[in-house]
Amino acid sequence: MKKLLIGAFIILGSGLSAMAQSEVKAKAILAEVSKKYRSYDVIKTEFTYTLENPQAKIKETQTGTLFVRSKVNKYKVILKGQELISDGKNQWMYLKADKEVQLSEVDNSSDALNPAKIFTIYEKGFKSVYTNDTQLSGKPVHNIELSPLDAKRSFFKVKLQIDKASKQIMNAVIFDKNGNRYTYAIKTFIPNIKVPESTFAFDAKLYPGVELVDLR
């Protein structure tokens, strides 16, 4: 019996050690990703966004373009049916079919997600674990899994795939508690692109005939 107990403790100890090592490795990789990302000014990416719910047999995919100023919370997201624009304080949601723009304050709560946060989602409020390394689109990638420290968050897991060479996030999958799965696949990544500051603010003159609804 003593030998069995000793063996069990040895196995448990080795398992905990491996887990600790995977956490250390994940944090080191994410620190490199964050340092590289924060070194850029404005980034432009082309991405594919997919919403899946296997139980409800839902799968919707659309492509988009994202401009984000990495050092502050400013972004512009262009999708087929809508645009999201933020100057860091306010957010304008342009609904093309409705010819309406909804103005609201930026939601900085832990549950709030937008494509711009994909590049920094891991920076606080998560436990990170390195799972393995594979290939994505012919490139070697690190696979890291995030678990929110706050159990009340609407999602319970995030999977990141990070290009080993460029230290850039190539793919992010968010799993929420309602069975939905959101996948952001980064197709292009252009750092330090030059855009006017007006990119990150709503200009009514560029949207003639559109109604502005202030929700603040």
Image: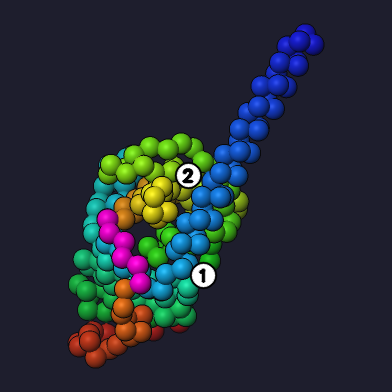
Q: Quadrant of residue 124?
A: bottom right
Identified by mark 2, the residue type is Ile
- Residue at image coords 47%, 67%: 38
Q: Which mark is residue 108?
A: 1
Residue 2 visible in the snapshot: yes
- Residue at image coords 63%, 28%: 15
Circles 2 and 1: CB distance less than 8 Å? no
Q: Residue furthest bottom?
A: 205
Distance between mark 2 and mark 1 Cα atoms: 24 Å
145 to 4, vertically: above or below:
below
Quadrant, the N terminus: top right
Please check the rendered image and state whether residue 190 is part of the magenta-colored stretch, yes or no: yes
Q: Which numbered disc flags the more N-terminal residue, 2 or 1?
A: 1
Residue 84 visible in the snapshot: no
Q: Which mark is residue 52?
A: none
- Residue at image coords 27%, 79%: 100
Please check the rendered image and state whether residue 159 is part of the magenta-colored stretch, yes or no: no
- Residue at image coords 66%, 27%: 14
Q: Secondary structure at mark 2?
A: strand
In the foreground, 109 or 77: 77
* Residue neighbourhood size for the residue with mark 2, other residues' Cα within 10 Å, grouped as few (<14), some (14–19), many (≥20): many
Looking at the rendered image, the disc whose residue lies closer to the viewer, 2 or 1, is 2
Structure colour scheme:
rainbow
Q: Secondary structure at mark 1?
A: loop
Image check: 105 left or right of 67?
right
Where does the image place residue 208, in percent across and percent down from the top left?
Answer: 20, 88
Q: Quadrant of residue 62?
A: bottom left
In the foreground, 139 or 146: 139
Q: Which residue is mark 2?
A: 144
Q: What span is in magenta?
A: 187-192
